[in-house]
Amino acid sequence: MGFDRRPLTPGDVGNWAALLTAIQDADGDDEYASEQDLRERFEDPARDFATSSIAVYDGPTLAGYGVLMCRGAADPVHDMLYMGGVHPSYRGRGLGGELLDWAEHAAAPLSHQRFPGHPLSLATGCPSTNAAAIALYEQRGYQPVRWFQEMVRDLSVPVPPPVTPAGVRITAYRPDLAGHALLVRNESFRDHWGSTQTSPEHWAHFLASAAFRPQFSFLACEEPEPLGMLIARESEAYHAHTGRRDVHIALVGTRASARKRGIATALLLSTMAAARADGYARASLDVDSDSLTGAVRLYEHLGFTVASTWISYRKQLSEG
């Protein structure tokens, strides 16, 4: 088709952000990304864009992209992640299938280098309303394996005051508590579907993001033990496109031994109350619809409602 194909580089962030905006507008999604968000991805120690990305250009226009990301573990299958998309003006020309073909071929050597001898699968996904993407994945042998819901809470509605469980102290996030927060993150997500351990290096990168909002992030402790944590972020790109401020609850978790004590509820209410007082319009989060912790019921109890659904697809690429 006369397109130029090469890896993504930091110099592409402006075109990449414009492409993602066009995709989100066409598909009715609100997960926008700014140039800063994308620039930070190149600084992520877990990514190597030179070997795990592709940019498809038509002259100066970025028509499509694809990015692969290795997981932190293969247990025993390495379930590699793929994200990609095609500009709405270039759809219907086979680019989506070409990008998926690239991802499947590029995934094998990357996986072998990191987890030799392990089976490999490729995970991807799309909004439940994207019929074209669903058809493409299913035609290529991908199976739906999980449904994730974006839930939102209108912060113009009053937030009940948090009730702290007896013996527990809710503490505002401080840099010296980063290790406690990581400990809780890794232990509380150990039984979550598809989750792997987060390394200290990746955690430091995550907390260094311009999107991190420490003023709305909290830890729950029962001295000397950390029991729960909530990490909040904000998408400046969403604010720029909608004019509304959204506090996104990126992570909330409680260690298994401390569950059923109201700790997650206290953390969520602390974040929502602080964001509401600061003029934020809504709170948002993403949740596994089949979560074993009963998270969906908890969020509904606190006033969250489902705004959209994301389908996770998976295809086995090798048996190891």
Image: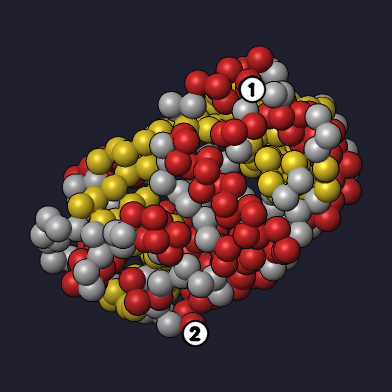
Q: Mark 2 highlights which residue?
A: 176
Residue in view at x 37 percent, y 42 percent = 150
Report x, y in % for residue 114: 83, 50
Q: Nearer the viewer, residue 253 or 209?
A: 209
Report x, y in % for residue 182: 53, 68
Helix, strand or loop at disc 2?
helix
Can residue 188 be seen? yes
Report x, y in % for residue 137: 63, 22
Quadrant of the rendered structure where residue 278 is?
bottom left
Q: Amino acid at mark 2?
A: Asp
Residue in view at x 28 percent, y 76 percent = 169
Query: Which numbered disc, 2 or 1, marks the residue closer to the eye?
Result: 1
Q: Height in image: 219 above or below 102? A: below
Helix, strand or loop at disc 1?
loop
Q: Amino acid at mark 1?
A: Gly
Q: Earlier in the sequence, mark 2 or mark 1?
A: 1
Circles 2 and 1: CB distance less than 8 Å? no
Q: Looking at the rendering, in which quadrant would you find the C terminus?
A: top right
Query: What is the image's colouring?
Result: secondary structure
Image position of 69 (left or right of 269): right
Residue in view at x 89 percent, y 42 percent = 109
Q: CA distance from mark 2 to mark 1?
A: 51 Å
Picture mark count: 2
Q: Mark 1 highlights which residue?
A: 92
Can residue 148 be seen? no
Q: Height in image: 127 above or below 207? A: above
Q: Looking at the rendering, in which quadrant would you find the N terminus?
A: top right
Residue 209, numbered label: none
Residue in view at x 32 percent, y 44 percent = 151
Image position of 208 (left or right of 299): right
